[in-house]
Amino acid sequence: MAEIPLSVLFGALVVLLGLSAFFSGSETALMSLNPYRLKHMADQGHPGAKRAWKLLQQPDRLIGLILLGNNFINIIITQLATFIGYRLFDDSGIAIATGVLTLVLLIFAEVAPKTLGALHSEKLAYPAAFIYTPLLKLAYPIVWLINKMANSVLALIGVPTQIHNGNALSHEELKSVVKEAGEHIDRSHQEMLLRVLELEKASVKDIMIPRAEIEGIDLEWPPEEIEKTIMQSNYTRMPVYVGNINNIVGYIHMRRILSLATADMLDREHIEKHMRKPYFIPESTSLTQQLLNFKKARRSHAIVVDEYGDVQGLVTMEDLLGEIVGEFALDSGVLSEILPQNDGSYIVEGSINIRQLNRSLNMNLPDEGPHTLNGLITEYLEAIPDAPTCVMINGYPLEITKTTDNSIALVRVWLERKQDAGNDGES
């Protein structure tokens, strides 16, 4: 060693520092890889991604290999730097070498390469995977022994060493991923994905047409009244019942009933002949499940019933699709139940679903209790108010402008929330 030129020793030191930097930077790069992007690229056949994915399936072996190599290199660096310091400055050179080496290792073999690995993980991790794959095979016996001893120590202190799949995302985590996708996903597509994830939280009761608004045909009506009802209807399908809405016996498509009207055959016998059997669903069915049920049953129209079998409302495939792609609006861009006013407020029908109102006007009215604006206000006031009456709910000023004997018909809504939302009240 004494005859080796200092230039050769310094050259070896630089090479060893480069190897140490490689181990440090590649470790951070491999551990910083996005597991979902990595899996996608591996499935697409990317050679580096395939090797990196395989290495990361057993991270304890990979980490053992990297630490073995890094520590071995760092020990040689320490010995070599100490020898160089001693040759240059005798005994005092050992202390100098220790101080300088600590700074050099920290900057050039730890902080800088780890930062580079975190910032450019794929550029460093994929080439490194080509090196680690054969290196792991060569050093496997030593790595296995080290891991076995380390796992035994952890087991003695009660720490489990089984490797679990920690990449599975929860429902809320998946929503966060979609929200953070940013420019990678079109805004409208991002909103639809978020709505799909929200379907499981809502039930058909949240989006159904309430019982009071169902338009149907009573088989006990005379043909003249049936014809008048269908001529005034805006729906393509109508429920058919006997006596009252709780006794729905089927539904009929408008084109069939119009053909009956044209042929002057709007009687009970012909309507029953052309109607289809009703499809009943419980009000607690989630929107996700109902979407699957519609597909399985090949239906697009269902009657919602409660636990006693009483009709609560009606839901269609269009209602479900509206939850995903957004409510179907008129040419003005807003729902028919919402009319913008010149003063910046909106006149809203009391029967509107709160979820629709929140989504259409970007509001935050509570929707965990009553499902309609009428229900929300009457529950809050514990009475059906006379018009005009003002109330503030969740910071939003609401003015009841029209009521009927048993419900609120129209409400003026202001979108500007009041700061002192805690003092909600009536005036």
Image (cartoon, grey):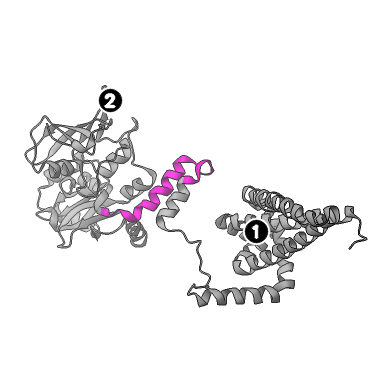
* Left or right: where 293 falls relative to 390: right
Find numbered disc 1 in the image and state the secondary structure of the residue it sits on.
helix
From the image, give the main secondary structure of the stretch colored magenta: helix
Eyeballing the image, is 408 above or below 367?
above
Outermost residue on the top side: it is 342
Q: Quadrant of residue 74?
A: bottom right
* Left or right: where 98 falls relative to 177: right
Write the residue at 51% across / 77% down: 156
Measured as percent of width and height from the top left, residue 290 is found at 32, 58
Q: Label 2 belongs to which residue?
A: 344
Which residue range is magenta in the image?
180-204
If the image is split into quadrants, where does the C terminus sit? top left
Labelled disc at residue 27 = 1
Q: Quadrant of residue 349?
A: top left
- The type of residue carrying mark 1 is Glu
* Left or right: where 287 falls relative to 242: right
Write the residue at 27% across / 22% down: 342
Measured as percent of width and height from the top left, residue 225 is found at 12, 44
In magenta segment, residue 198 = yes
